[in-house]
Image: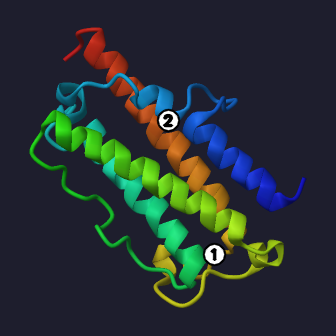
């Protein structure tokens, strides 16, 4: 198995498979209600909805970087503002994350193995412009595992009745 195939497998497992670290992102999100998604744990804390939008933004940005080469902030920003809560808006948010995942998987599969050691192109170093594609892709899997863990904790807190 090539490194790109391992990375693709890692991203797929974290998203909808059986990652070693716990439940996949899709399984954690599957039964979250609109109310749970929109609830903020504290005045300065991110809601589940905000976390999902953040993951969608960066997954899409990684896919774009693989296709185009330059590093920049995601089109929707680092922390997109959640819309007015509704079942339709929540479904659209989840669908957007699924689409971003498909885009990054297609971009990974279309990449040449030698590209893994290339730097992320031009742009702001604080946005990863000097990072290799290998580090960026492993970082995306780590980023998603981190935020999926946050979502899992919020879900448990909300359902256990802890305020």
Q: Which scheme is used to colour this image of the protein? A: rainbow
Residue ID at (36%, 46%): 95
In x, y percent, where is residue 149?
48, 33
The answer to whether residue 154 is left or right of residue 104 is left
Label 2's element? helix
Q: Position of residue 152 (x, y in %)?
A: 42, 26
Residue hosting label 1: 131
Residue at 47% x, 36% y: name it: 148
| Left or right: where 10 falls relative to 91 | right
Q: Residue at x 63, y 75 (%)?
A: 131
Q: What residue did someone put label 2 on?
A: 25
Apparent side of residue 146 relative to residue 55 in the rendered image (left or right):
right
1 and 2 marks in contact (CB < 8 Å)? no
Q: Is residue 142 left or right of residue 35?
A: right
**Residue 49 sits above or below residue 4 on the image:** above
Q: Position of residue 150 (x, y in %)?
A: 41, 34
Say above or below: 92 vs 60: above
Question: Pointer 2: residues within 10 angstroms few (<14), some, or many (20+)?
Answer: many
Where's residue 100, x and y in %? 46, 57
Residue placed farthest to the left in the image? 84
Pointer 1 or 2: first along the chain: 2
């Amino acid at each position: 198995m090539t490194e790109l195939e391992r990375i693709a497998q890692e991203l797929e497992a974290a998203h909808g498979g059986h990652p070693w670290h716990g439940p996949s992102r899709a399984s954690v999100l599957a039964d979250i209600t609109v109310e749970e998604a929109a609830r903020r744990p504290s005045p300065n804390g991110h809601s589940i909805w905000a976390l999902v939008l953040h993951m969608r933004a960066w997954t899409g940005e990684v896919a774009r970087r693989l296709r185009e080469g330059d590093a920049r902030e995601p089109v929707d920003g680092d922390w997109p503002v959640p819309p007015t809560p509704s079942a339709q808006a929540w479904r659209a948010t989840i669908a957007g994350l699924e689409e971003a995942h498909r885009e990054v998987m297609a971009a990974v599969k279309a990449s040449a193995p030698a590209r893994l050691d290339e730097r992320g192109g031009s742009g702001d170093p604080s946005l990863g412009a000097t990072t290799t594609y290998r580090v960026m892709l492993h970082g995306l899997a780590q980023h998603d595992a981190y935020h999926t863990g946050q979502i899992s904790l919020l879900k448990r807190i909300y359902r256990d009745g802890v305020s």
